[in-house]
Image (cartoon, grey):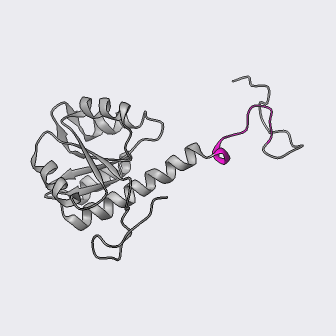
Amino acid sequence: MAAVSPRLGSGRLPIADAGVEILLVSGGSADYACLCHIIDHSNWKLHRAQDCQEALAFLQQHPVGVVITQVSLPDGCWKDLLAELTRVGCPPNLIISSRLADEQLWAEVLSLGGYDVLMTPFEREEVFRVGSYAWMDWRGRLGKLVSPASQPPAAGVSAQPGIKPPGNAGGLRH
């Protein structure tokens, strides 16, 4: 888990201090300029893609833990991007940005597997709070994927010596 620092924001919330990389998917430049200004004096790194296809191409070469996207994009919407992200081994957490961030959008985002909603124009403390938690959640999931303890035993091999695993140890699939 990354070090956390209360120096950003109010000091009451943990802020991921190092290694945070965010991909902003936005057709406009205002959100990018605002986020650049917000994270300017932090150790966070911001990347940008103009649309879903550019975002997916970027993520194939450079995985990040957090993606912030507008509701509507030139080649789709946040739901299209979310559907594509779920095909990644450890998908980044998707945060939706909207000027009309209301309870209905928030409920829909959460029910479909998104992480959260940020209202635009972005507010510094909200960006750091939501971004930190999203990134730490992703790092936790990533750690579980690569941890040897999280790997299932090979077929016919028990996690405990002398105990045969249940089920189809012969490797045949039904």
Classify residue 130 as left or right of residue 164. left
Q: Is residue 114 left or right of residue 136?
A: left
Q: Main secondary structure of the magenta part?
A: loop
Residue 83 to residue 23: above or below: above
Q: Residue furthest right?
A: 162
**Depth check: 138 or 36 in front?**
36
Q: Give the residue at x 79% y 38%.
A: 166
Quarter of image, res 15: bottom left
| Count of all numbered marks drawn on residues in the image | 0
Q: Quadrant of residue 69?
A: top left
Screen quadrant of the C terminus? top right
Percent position (x, y) of residue 173? 69, 24
Residue 45: x %, y % from top left: 29, 50
What residue is rendered at 39% in x and 54% in y? Answer: 135
Residue 72 shows in the view: yes
* Residue 168 sits in quarter: top right
Q: Is residue 156 above or below residue 128?
A: above
Q: Report whether 42 appears left or right of 164.
A: left
For the record, the magenta segment spans 148-158
Q: Please, is residue 7 above or below residue 120 in the view? A: below
The question of residue 153 being in magenta is answered with yes
* Percent of width and height locating residue 118: 23, 57
Q: Is residue 100 visible?
A: no
Q: Looking at the image, which is closer to me, 20 or 80? A: 20
Q: Is residue 35 magenta?
A: no
| Residue visible at 25% across and 64% down in the picture | 126
Query: Residue 111: percent from the left, percent from the top?
Result: 37, 50
Q: Is residue 114 left or right of residue 52?
A: right
